[in-house]
């Protein structure tokens, strides 16, 4: 699984605003107009909100896709990388995660106040979107799990997370990753 490049990260949200994803279409169009996501060529907005528990509204970029995803009835912001990134698997995961967090924070900051959104940066789903390179098997899960644990060590959160395989039979490799603190933040211990 060393060559896995098509990586997705979903940041979950309990915000009611994400139930009506079409309200965010004008915001995504403004992002395209001002090229709001660094190092991304933003191209178009696609509305799949009519699909039950589907991808919602998508912001298409050359490098990846941003979606107000509704899969499994669990709303959140999904960033799915399409283009290669440098580094080892942990480096690529961290890069994808950083892009997803950046977009989520931008969405929180710029959403219309009547459609305010709050993301839980500790509740993540990591998706290997390449079944040939990373099938949903135990070996691929362990490899991805090791990369996630490596990131936890970088952030000083080792051993404080939950990493669970939630892949569907014959589906993509999907992992729910619950952290004790937001990515990159150290957990504060109160004594």
Image (tube, rainbow, N blue to C red):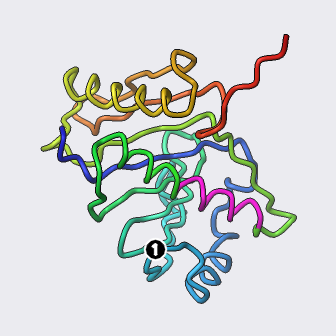
Q: Residue reaching furthest left?
A: 132
Label 1: which residue? 39
Q: Residue reaching furthest top?
A: 191
The residue that appears at 35% across and 32% down in the rendered structure is: 147
Per the rendered image, the range of residues in magenta is 100-109
Query: Crowding near pointer 1: few (<14 within 10 Å), some, many (20+)?
Result: few
Q: Quadrant of residue 181?
A: top right
- In this rendering, is residue 184 above or below 177? below
Q: What secondary structure is marked by label 1?
A: loop
The residue that appears at 54% across and 20% down in the rendered structure is: 161
Q: Residue reaching furthest bottom?
A: 33
Q: Position of residue 117 (x, y in %)?
A: 75, 55
The residue that appears at 29% across and 57% down in the rendered structure is: 86
- In this rendering, is residue 20 above or below 11? below
Locate the C terminus and report the quarter of the image it occupies.
top right
- Name the magenta segment's main secondary structure: helix
Q: Position of residue 156 (x, y in %)?
A: 57, 27
Q: Quadrant of residue 155?
A: top right
């Amino acid at each position: 699984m060393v060559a896995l490049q098509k990586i997705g990260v979903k940041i979950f949200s309990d915000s009611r605003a994400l139930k009506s994803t079409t309200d965010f279409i004008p915001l995504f169009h403004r992002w395209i107009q001002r090229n709001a996501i660094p190092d991304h060529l933003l191209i178009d907005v696609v509305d799949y909100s009519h699909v039950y528990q589907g991808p919602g509204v998508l912001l298409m970029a050359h490098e990846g896709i941003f979606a107000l995803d509704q899969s499994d009835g669990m709303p959140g912001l999904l960033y799915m990388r399409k283009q290669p990134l440098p580094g080892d698997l942990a480096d690529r995961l961290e890069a994808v995660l950083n892009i997803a967090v950046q977009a989520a924070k931008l969405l929180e900051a710029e959403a219309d106040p009547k459609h305010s959104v709050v993301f839980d940066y500790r509740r993540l789903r990591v998706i290997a979107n390449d079944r040939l390179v990373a099938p949903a098997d135990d070996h691929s899960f362990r490899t991805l799990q090791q990369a996630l644990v490596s990131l936890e060590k970088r952030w000083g959160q080792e051993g404080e997370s939950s990493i669970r395989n939630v892949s569907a039979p014959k589906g993509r490799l999907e992992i729910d990753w619950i952290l004790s603190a937001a990515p990159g933040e150290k957990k504060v211990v109160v004594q």
